[in-house]
Amino acid sequence: MGREAAMGESVVENGTAPRLALPPRPKTRLGLWQHLKATRANSVSTWSDAAFEMELGERHMLWRHVIIANAPEHVRHVLLDNAENYVRSSLSRRLLEPGLGQGLLTTHGATWRRQRRMMAPAFAAKRIADFAPAMVEAAERLAWDWSRVPPSAPVDLAEAMSGLTLAIISEAMFSVRVDPEIALIGQAVAVYQSAIRPSIADLIGLPDWLPRPAVRRAHRIFAESDRVIQRLIDERRRHGGPDDLLAMLLAAPDGEAPASAKEVRDHVATIFTAGHETTANALAWTFYLLSLHPAERRRLEDELDRVLGERAATAEDVPNLTFTRMVIEESMRLYPPAHTMSRQALGPDRLGTIELRKGSSVLIVPWLLHRHRKLWDRPDEFRPDRFAPAEVAARPRFAYIPFGAGPHICIGASFAMTEAILCLATIARRFRLTLVPGTTVEPVGLITLRPKHGLPMRLERR
Ligand code: HEM
């Protein structure tokens, strides 16, 4: 089936908006086999032009009934108003459970509610300021390393952002700098994320009792990192320690038994997985967009000069870095790190004209919704001003959902926004980053949306 050439190369054309990197787009509807293959390789490459205008889509994939909810009212219905009728799909459970076990991303019902209650205080907006110094220090350390890179030598920004957010989540979790042992946890999570492509069996929904090589593979990937986590748990139980995320996971909520070592391990793996590559990708895409939009980059630098001057950022600066926040929000509109969410109906329901039955799947795809032709003016252009308060208030709330919505809304949303704002501010205050000319950039949707070939960038000191 014919596919258009990728608009991979980003071109700055004088006077017109630069063309931004897009994945290949099918010109005609893909057959089942082609669709499954394309989903495995890059799930955002399966959507045709028509998908960016539809409100509801429906597919029958052998025995699977799949609905695409692509209008704010349908998204609201599934994620919020009738959320009790939906659980995360068995596909995402099949992908995540072998490595992450029983954590917030894989459980539902009473177990999920208990876990969410236990973790909510640690991620509450008022606690996030406690993590801010570690966020800024990690970004300052990276800037210091970069100050010794010769201007002619490009850095891989995607890799650098991944290292940065790993350092931050490690410090928030264990109150230690990344050492070679802690790095093993990050490596395991990264390897797992690249390794867990859905198999064709996963995509067509074969029964769970069929043998799954993914389970054995996951155990191998996490073997060493699990030993490190176990040692950190044992040490902390014996000697106590600071009030970090690990302390929160080990503390028993009132009247409840403390979590077992296996439960704590699953939560650690879940938080590292959910909270590391997502923010790294948000930052990497943000620098990519700024590199193509010098005027917006100048506005950002002006704000940083005005609010911070020569000093390092702190948590108190975050509310004043309004344009910095708008830049990140617009970047997550165009390149949402969590590009697709899936749900499975527990019982019958109706979306518009479509009847859902027990077991029907619903896809909610920020990649489509955030570029929807009827919701956004010039949807493929980078315009941070869309996130000025008046414009936000004029839009349906469920048109923009980088952190999801409803009961499963990202528990780390405040953490991630604070982290992204402080890291962007710290780096952009010191460096101007430019994409190496001629670079082909292609978004690839696996678990998160990342630049397929990395992002080579040149650094210029400000
Ligand atoms: C820019 C960064 C991030 C983005 C775009 C993002 C996005 C999301 C989205 C869309 C969901 C909802 C998934 C669904 O409904 O199926 C989610 C859930 C979750 N996120 Fe994030 N996330 C980010 C950062 C973080 C961070 C920093 C953490 C932790 C430190 C985190 C932890 C979680 C957890 C544990 C869940 C599951 C919540 C639940 O089901 O109760 N995320 N995230």
Image: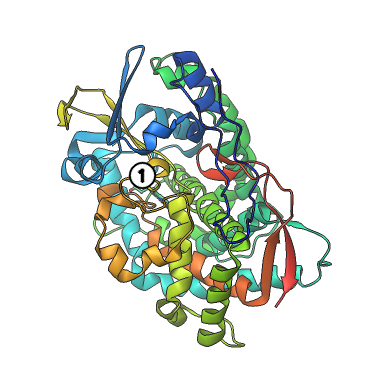
Q: Is residue 350 left or right of residue 359?
A: left
Which residue is drawn at the image coordinates 28% and 55% (left, top)?
117
The quarter of the picture where the C terminus appears is bottom right
Q: Is residue 360 left or right of residue 376?
A: left
Task: Return the residue nearer the eye: 116 or 196.
Answer: 196
In the structure shown, which secondary structural element does the residue marked by tag 1 occupy? loop
Which residue is drawn at the image coordinates 74% and 53% (left, top)?
437
Find residue 380 and report its horizontal and vertical position in percent. Answer: 46, 49
Find residue 379 and report its horizontal and vertical position in percent. Answer: 41, 50
Find residue 447 and report its horizontal and vertical position in percent. Answer: 50, 39
Task: Return the residue nearer the eye: 150 or 257.
Answer: 150
Q: Amino acid at mark 1?
A: His
Question: Colour mode?
Answer: rainbow
From the viewer's perspective, is residue 281 above or below residue 142? above
Task: Return the residue nearer the eye: 88 or 69.
Answer: 69
Residue corresponding to mark 1: 372
The reply to whether residue 256 is in sight is no
Instruction: Please tell me how crowded label 1 is: few (under 14), some (14-19), or many (20+) other residues with Cα within 10 Å.
Output: many
The quarter of the picture where the N terminus appears is top right
Which residue is drawn at the image coordinates 40% and 27% (left, top)?
91
Q: Is residue 19 left or right of residue 60?
A: right
